[in-house]
Image: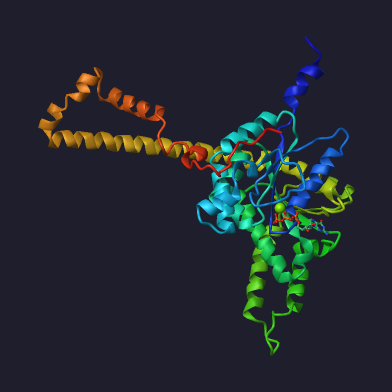
Amino acid sequence: MSEPSSSTNAPEKKKPIVIITIGMAGAGKSTFVQRINSYLHSQNPPVPPYILNLDPAVTHVPFEPNIDIRDTVNYHEVMKQYNLGPNGGILTALNLFTTKFDEVLDLVEKRSADVDYIILDTPGQIEIFTWSASGAIITDAVASSLPAVVAYIIDTPRTTSPATFMSNMLYACSILYKTKLPFILVFNKTDVQPHEFAVEWMQDFEAFQAALATHKGTTDDEGEPTYMNSLMNSMSLVLDEFYKQLKVYLPLSNLLASANAYSNTMQAVGVSSVTGAGIKEFFEAVDASRAEYERDYLPELKRAREAREKTLQAAKEDSMNRLMKDLAVDREQNPEAAAADKWEQEDEDGGDDDDLDVNIIDRSEEPWPGQYIDITRARPHEEEHMSWPRPG
Ligand SMILES: Nc1nc2c(ncn2[C@@H]2O[C@H](COP(=O)(O)OP(=O)(O)OP(=O)(O)O)[C@@H](O)[C@H]2O)c(=O)[nH]1
Ligand SMILES: [Mg+2]
């Protein structure tokens, strides 16, 4: 009855896509987040993103985060209270924050009608996010409710040596396989060092082999190839498989039209967070990732959920069967005790099954210590300034 355009507009609003920035310390993650933030604000009309800062130890972030881990957990207090060093402190702060991540997700989901991009800036020490339980919980929680993509930030000037380049790519490879999310290799700082060498190495296996051969340290004093050389050669064969899925975004967008046609898991783009070069291409890669998330990640997620539910159901049935068997054996062995066990009959008129049901329901309704960790109540401390994130 009403105009079709107005009635279809609202349901057609795409879900926002979550950009998870990950990268080695100092690769330029925060500067990159600032750059994409200002790029999105400068669009016509502006599309302000929703930003989460997950680095508890940072003293200054070059953007205004909508949710900031530092509002929730005081990193210095955590270090003091738990007697931890800087990395343990960051990890524990992230763990504490993760216990309340459901509330964060609620806030994010509430805003998803108004925003197109949600950006996560992660702690400087890459392994704290990529190899901790909290990092995995946050990534999975986000990716199971919204489309998500990993932006792997690479410090291009620092990866010009073949060995460093390969270690960085192996790390990228491990994160890709761990998260299984669409992946964008963001070669940052191209104002200092253009990333063409990296594209060549990824696309031309022989070019990388040639670079390896001339690299110092790959031959010993007598000119014989070292152990390092043969290790790097075999590693580069592994990476060649990883690169096969690569699509490279060049600033010549007419090249992209044909490239978009084939399926891929990984994209590469060169940017400068300082000058803003390549940011447009980065967003083209993000848009392509949304389709990939829906095509590859979502069905896999559904399959995993169904499998988990089946396993849970089977485990429940199994433990119930074992409980019933144990009860039967118990009664057989102690007929007197079973007869004297009047509690059941007094308490409940129904059969055994009903009695068990009542117990389960009672337990689940009662709040019990392991059910929910309230960090503010669990460790009351006057100096612990934990407050809850303010919606932006
Ligand atoms: N020339 C140049 N410098 C950059 C670029 N991006 C970041 N930087 C510099 O790299 C340094 C580190 O940048 P950050 O954004 O703090 O890096 P980060 O990855 O967030 O660092 P941590 O969170 O501490 O690991 C800063 O001095 C930035 O100015 C870039 O595109 N070009
Ligand atoms: Mg940072």
Q: Which residue sits at x=22%, y=34%?
A: 327
**Quick check: can you spot residue 260?**
no
Is 168 in front, or is 224? 168
Q: Which residue sits at x=64%, y=45%?
A: 70
**Quick check: can you spot residue 2?**
yes
Residue 296 in the image: above or below residue 89:
above
Expressed as whole percent of the image width and height from the top left, the position of residue 35 reads: 81, 47
Q: In the rendered image, which quarter is residue 168 located in?
A: bottom right
Is 67 in front, or is 136? 67
Relative placement, left or right, of 85 versus 295 is left
Relative placement, left or right, of 190 versus 235 is right
Residue 52 in the image: above or below residue 344:
below
Is 278 in front, or is 32? 32
Residue 117 in the image: above or below residue 131:
above
- Residue positioned most to the bottom: 222
Expressed as whole percent of the image width and height from the top left, the position of residue 240 reads: 69, 63
Expressed as whole percent of the image width and height from the top left, the position of residue 90 reads: 59, 53
Expressed as whole percent of the image width and height from the top left, the position of residue 163 reads: 70, 70
Q: Quadrant of ligand 1?
A: bottom right
Q: Which residue sits at x=77%, y=17%?
A: 7
Residue 341 in the image: above or below residue 387:
above
Looking at the image, how many numbered discs can be counted on the residues?
Answer: 0
Quadrant of the image for the N terminus?
top right
